[in-house]
């Protein structure tokens, strides 16, 4: 619980200082998979930050799940891409971890090489990152992970955005030895509509969690959300 409170404090400090966007998702997993996901939190907040500099880039996100009694879990990922040469290749280092009320996530430390592409006007781009993954205090700690990310701004003046990530990694669990997780998001950016102020940075859309053998679940799941996002300038 102390860790959850610490994550909460970190969330609000990020909101004040450095955030690029804040999201709120209404999760429909409990309605679709009423038996398997009974009791699953319906509200999740996400804070994302991306910052590029002359030595590479930094990205992190923090997820918090809410029930009527308050925050019941927190999870975050942070990575640094480092280079002293021209793109597209960079060194990639990453940390994943979190906590629920019932059990902690194992600390995961990752390292690899990332290839990234961005179009000249930054209306689309993607990255591919193969990594070694060390899962602390796991019965089989030495693993690998392959991650892909993408973004596309399209329609008139970037009215719509399609973005997301996909992870495939090895981790020995009761469900199997390999896990897949992808979270594509679709957004309609309201400030691109005629008559709406350019500084009104609200987007509405959806995320779909596509997973296989993830979160202690056996098999494939597709869990959609209804979401809103505010992007900070």
Image (cartoon, grey):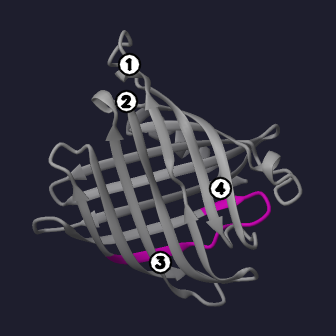
Outermost residue toward the left in this view? 86
**Residue drawn at point x = 84 percent, y = 60 percent:** 36
Q: Are marks 1 and 2 in contact (CB under 8 Å)?
A: yes
- Residue that lies at the very extreme toward the front in this rendered image: 155
Disc 1 target residue:
193
Residue 102 shown in magenta? yes
Tag 4's secondary structure?
helix
Q: Nearer the viewer, mark 4 or mark 3?
A: 3
Mark 3 and mark 2: span between their CA atoms? Answer: 33 Å
Q: Which residue is mark 2?
A: 159
Q: In the rendered view, would you say 81 is above or below 164?
A: below
Front: mark 4 or 1: 1
Please determine whether, in this image, residue 93 is positioned above or below residue 187.
below
The residue to which callout 3 is attached is 145
Cα distance in 3D space between marks 2 and 4: 39 Å
Q: Which residue is mark 4?
A: 3
**10 Å crowding of disc 2: few (<14), some (14-19), many (20+):** some
Q: CA distance from mark 3 to mark 1?
A: 39 Å
Give percent across and percent down for residue 19. Answer: 41, 39
Give the magenta range. 98-112
Q: Are marks 3 and 1 in contact (CB under 8 Å)?
A: no
> If you read the primary sequence from the N terminus, does the residue marked by circle 1 or circle 2 appear first?
2
Marked residue nearer the N-terminal end (3 or 2): 3
Could you say which quadrant of the image residue 174 lies in?
bottom right
Instruction: Give residue 47's position: percent from left, percent from top.
Output: 50, 43
Residue that sits furthest to the top in the current view:
195
Give the crowd class for mark 3: few <14, some 14-19, many >=20 residues within 10 Å: many
| Label 4, label 3: how far apart the Cα atoms are | 26 Å
The residue under the point 23% across, 70% down is 90
Please say whether residue 61 is visible from this viewpoint. yes
């Amino acid at each position: 619980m102390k860790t959850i409170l610490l994550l909460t404090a970190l969330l609000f400090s990020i909101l004040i200082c450095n955030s690029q966007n804040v999201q709120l998702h209404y999760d429909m997993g409990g309605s679709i998979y009423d038996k398997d996901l009974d009791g699953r939190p319906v509200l999740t907040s996400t804070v994302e930050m991306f910052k590029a500099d002359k030595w590479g880039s930094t990205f992190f996100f923090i997820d918090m799940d809410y029930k009527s009694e308050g925050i019941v879990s927190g999870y975050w990922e942070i990575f640094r891409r480092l280079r002293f040469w021209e793109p597209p290749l960079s060194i990639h280092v990453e940390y994943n971890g979190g906590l629920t009320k019932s059990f902690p996530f194992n600390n995961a430390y990752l390292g690899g090489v990332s290839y990234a592409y961005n179009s000249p006007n930054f209306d689309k781009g993607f990255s591919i990152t193969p990594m070694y993954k060390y899962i602390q205090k796991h019965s089989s700690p030495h693993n690998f992970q392959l991650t892909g990310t993408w973004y596309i701004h399209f329609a008139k003046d970037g009215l719509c955005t399609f973005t997301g990530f996909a992870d495939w990694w090895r981790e020995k669990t009761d469900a199997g030895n390999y896990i897949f997780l992808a979270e594509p998001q679709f957004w309609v950016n309201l400030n691109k509509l005629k008559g709406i102020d350019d500084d009104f940075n609200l987007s509405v859309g959806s995320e779909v969690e596509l997973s296989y053998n993830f979160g202690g679940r056996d098999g494939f799941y597709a869990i959609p959300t209804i979401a809103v996002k505010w992007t900070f300038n």
